[in-house]
Image (tube, rainbow, N blue to C red):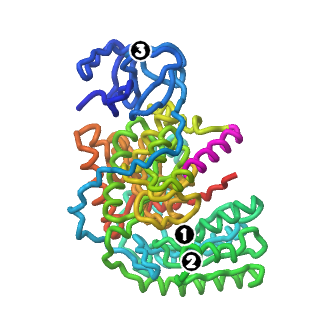
């Protein structure tokens, strides 16, 4: 195993692949560097001396400037470097890319749910949606009424652990006995008792919006909800409206038509102020949802070309290995799917800070490049006006694990998008329509961004992480990809794929990317249940742009 890595020939930083110690002599490309500091794995150290104000390069781009005079062998940290990124402008188109050989998958299909609009779902869910937070309690009542009786209830392993403690307490156990008790109960797989075997579940999109905010927030919420209803993984929906909220039903219906002019999925809309009593509303909602489930259950998985897969690309809890293992691996998966005619969504605009020129140059038209420039600059200005900025993007966990500046984090995060041309720039929460790599303006928060990608049409999400996160989505399988083997083993219950093999075992980015595509096909066919689905991780957070 190599001990250090230079990501790009222009870089003046090396990445430590294992813990290194002060005084060690590192030999790299025939140069000897004596370490002046301890350098933990994932962190970076200089290969050259730098004076205050001089530039640090990684991934071949500017990622920071020295705050003090530094020597070769010094570790970089938040005390001695500061964020810096090159400006960008709309220039000439640079659309050439190394299209990968996809002959291996030429005749490969996945088994999905075919919809009337020509899209294909990787899952088959029924949605229950509130137009406003006032209806959240009614959603909870419906969830209690429908989920367990229809066979979608979760196993009660943790409830049984609490019952064990209750028995111990009743038998006279003291505090220390309780704390030291072995209450682990191994879950036994149960045969599915679903009444509707072709329906993967009923999902409830609780949120705190719909009224009380700006009218723009209400419009955006309706568009997002329309995106979920028209997502190919949705079989149909029950919508609960109070009646007087800002997020009016006609706005939702208009947004649905924008996405599917001939929309024909079963859709039941109930207005509480028109129906009357809560009891009448809930009885009607239960009957209509049950009828919708009967119709949804008639859908069966059938073969579909891989071009019907739309992948959302996401990262969260990133570490110093994310940008050299997991992110470039799914970047190659992205290139493979684009070459196969599929759609890919790259989001999180704050995490493109410093690589804007490359993204702009890859936009297929000047118009798309101009839109990207406008969205990025407007977003950046609003962040500053709110007392923040893209330079404040790295979290404490990011920094602790080697992502010292936003530009370092962004340069690694952008690797998720591969190398193909950018076919469209979308503003939240627009729908993806063009095959190829699409950019979607979202915040850097991973849950809000994942929520947005699914609202724009993603029927699979690839989510890389170096620190670990349980994030999922109500209707789209979120495949959790570990950047390092330690994480994959430590949090094995919420991880799906390990790319630490790139760091540890010499697996290439290309081999890992192909392996991930094969995994995606199995997930899309319903052959593999990913950890986020297994744990019922149904994260849904709309973006309040203001």
Please tell me whether the stretch drawn in magenta is mainly helix, strand or loop: helix
Q: Which residue is mark 3?
A: 49
**Could you tell me how many numbered marks the image carries?**
3
State the residue at coordinates (74%, 79%): 272
Q: Which residue is mark 1?
A: 228
- Seen from the viewer's position, the closer of residues 154 and 456 is 456
Q: CA distance from mark 2 to mark 3?
A: 61 Å
Span colored in magenta: 372-387
Determine whether label 2 and label 1 are within 8 Å by CB: yes
State the residue at coordinates (65%, 38%): 388
- Seen from the viewer's position, the closer of residues 108 and 181 is 108
Q: Is residue 220 visible?
A: yes
Give the SS element for disc 3: loop
Q: Position of residue 486 (x, y in %)?
A: 34, 39
On-image quarter of the N terminus: top left
Please report whichever mark, 2 or 3, sits nearer to the chain's N-terminal start. 3
- Seen from the viewer's position, the closer of residues 167 and 535 is 535
Q: CA distance from mark 3 to mark 1?
A: 53 Å
Q: Position of residue 266 (x, y in %)?
A: 54, 84
Q: CA distance from mark 2 to mark 1?
A: 9 Å
Give the SS element for disc 1: helix
Please report whichever mark, 2 or 1, sits nearer to the chain's N-terminal start. 1
Q: Position of residue 314 (x, y in %)?
A: 46, 52
State the residue at coordinates (45%, 82%): 116
Determine whether label 2 and label 3 are within 8 Å by CB: no
- Which class describes the residues within 10 Å of circle 2: few (<14), some (14-19), or many (20+)? many
- Seen from the viewer's position, the closer of residues 87 and 410 is 87
Q: Which residue is mark 2?
A: 237
- Which class describes the residues within 10 Å of circle 1: few (<14), some (14-19), or many (20+)? many
Up/down of 302 relative to 107, above or below: below
Give the SS element for disc 2: strand
């Amino acid at each position: 195993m190599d001990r250090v890595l230079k990501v790009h020939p222009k870089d003046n930083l090396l990445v430590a692949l294992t813990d290194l110690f002060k005084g060690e002599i590192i030999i790299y490309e025939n140069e000897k560097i004596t370490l002046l500091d301890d350098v933990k794995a994932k962190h970076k150290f200089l290969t050259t001396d730098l004076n205050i104000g001089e530039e640090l390069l990684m991934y071949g781009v500017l990622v920071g400037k020295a705050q003090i005079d530094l020597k070769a062998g010094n570790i970089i940290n938040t005390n001695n470097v500061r964020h810096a990124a090159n400006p960008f402008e709309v220039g000439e188109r640079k659309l050439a890319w190394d299209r990968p050989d996809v002959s291996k998958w030429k005749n490969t299909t996945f088994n999905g749910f075919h919809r009337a609009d020509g899209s294909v779902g990787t899952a088959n869910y029924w949605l229950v949606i509130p137009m406003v937070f006032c209806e959240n309690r009614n959603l909870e009542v419906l969830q209690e009424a429908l989920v367990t009786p229809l066979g979608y209830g979760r196993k009660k392993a943790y409830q049984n652990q609490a019952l064990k403690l209750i028995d111990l307490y009743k038998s006279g156990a003291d505090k220390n006995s309780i704390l030291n008790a072995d209450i682990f109960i191994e879950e036994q797989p149960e045969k599915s008792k679903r009444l509707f075997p072709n329906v993967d579940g009923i999902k409830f999109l609780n949120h705190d919006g719909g009224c009380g905010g700006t009218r723009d927030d209400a419009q955006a919420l309706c568009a997002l909800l329309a995106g979920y209803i028209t997502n190919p993984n949705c079989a149909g929906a029950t919508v609960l409206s109070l009646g007087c909220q800002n997020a009016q039903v006609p706005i939702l219906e208009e947004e649905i038509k924008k996405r599917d002019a001939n929309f024909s999925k079963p859709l039941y809309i109930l207005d509480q102020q028109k129906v009357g009593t809560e009891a009448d509303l809930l009885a009607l909602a239960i009957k209509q949802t049950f009828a919708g489930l009967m119709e949804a259950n008639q859908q069966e998985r059938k073969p579909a070309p891989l071009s019907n897969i739309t992948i959302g690309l996401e990262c969260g809890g990133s570490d110093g290995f994310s940008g050299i293992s997991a992110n470039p691996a799914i970047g190659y998966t992205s290139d493979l799917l684009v070459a196969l005619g599929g759609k890919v969504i790259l989001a999180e605009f704050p995490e493109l800070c410093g690589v804007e020129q490359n993204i702009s140059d890859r936009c297929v038209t000047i118009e798309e490049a101009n839109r990207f420039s406008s969205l990025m600059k407007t977003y950046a200005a609003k962040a500053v006006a709110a007392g923040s900025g893209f330079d404040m993007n790295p979290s404490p966990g990011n920094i602790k694990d080697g992502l010292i500046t936003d530009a370092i984090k962004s340069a690694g995060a952008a690797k998720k998008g591969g190398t193909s041309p950018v076919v469209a720039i979308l503003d939240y929460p627009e729908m993806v329509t063009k095959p190829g790599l699409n950019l979607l303006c979202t915040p850097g928060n991973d849950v809000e961004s994942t929520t947005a990608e699914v609202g724009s049409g993603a029927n699979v999400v690839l989510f890389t992480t170096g620190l670990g996160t349980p994030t999922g989505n109500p209707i789209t399988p979120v495949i959790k990809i570990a950047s390092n083997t330690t994480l994959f083993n430590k949090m094995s219950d919420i991880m799906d794929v390990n790319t630490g093999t790139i760091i540890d075992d010499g697996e290439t980015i290309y081999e890992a990317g192909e392996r991930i595509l094969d995994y995606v096909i199995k997930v899309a066919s319903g052959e593999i249940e990913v950890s986020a689905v297994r744990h019922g991780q149904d994260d849904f957070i709309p973006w309040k742009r203001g």
